[in-house]
Image (spheres, rainbow, N blue to C red):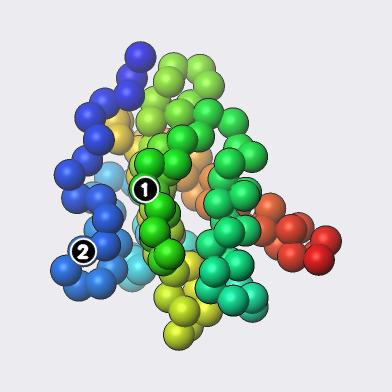
Amino acid sequence: MFAGTRPTNLGIQESGQLAACPSSPNCVNSQSQDAVHKIEPLTFDSTPTQAMADLKKVIENMDRTTIITETENYLYAEFKTKLMGYVDDVEFLLDSSSKVIHVRSASRLGQSDLGMNRKRIETIRAALSELKSKV
């Protein structure tokens, strides 16, 4: 119902990073430097291939989620809200040298997301941690 149009600035930018967040507070990005948008990247201690496989597994187990693009170091998924069908664009970029996965989660529409993008990334972080502890 409120899906909006897929942004044209998704993917790995010429800088080798994910797109910056807009000025609105409905976005988080681990490569951002400002307090409103900054979030810690996901960390891993496995191989990069295993880290991406674990991430994909976690995302596939989340409700109303569709993986749109997947490469060996990048994953883009759309998350749809239960109530009104708002779509959030969520990107993951693996940095094997730093053993982190950078994240960007942004709402397509509106100004505020009531903290949902930040909460989603923290939920993914917790699920990855739980997955690691089962190994």
**Tag 2 residue:** 13
> Between 127 and 35, which is closer to the camera in this rendering?
127
Please give left or right for residue 80 compared with residue 135 in the image: left
Cα–Cα span, label 1 and label 2: 15 Å
Label 2 secondary element: loop
The residue under the point 66% across, 58% down is 128
Give the answer, above or below, for where 57 lies relative to 17: above
Q: Where is residue 67 in the image (x, y as percent from the top left)?
A: 44, 41
Does the rendering let one see residue 102? no
**Tag 1 residue:** 69
Label 1 secondary element: strand
Please give left or right for residue 105 compared with residue 120 in the image: left
Question: First in sequence: mark 1 or mark 2?
Answer: 2
Q: How crowded is mark 2: few (under 14 residues within 10 Å), some or many (20 or more)?
A: few
The residue under the point 25% across, 35% down is 6
Give the answer, above or below, for where 21 lies relative to 5: below
The single residue placed furthest to the right in the displayed view is: 134
Q: Where is residue 87 in the image (x, y as percent from the top left)?
A: 38, 31
Please give left or right for residue 93 compared with residue 42 in the image: left
The residue under the point 20% across, 72% down is 15
Give the answer, above or below, for where 104 lies relative to 25: below
The amino acid marked with disc number 1 is: Thr
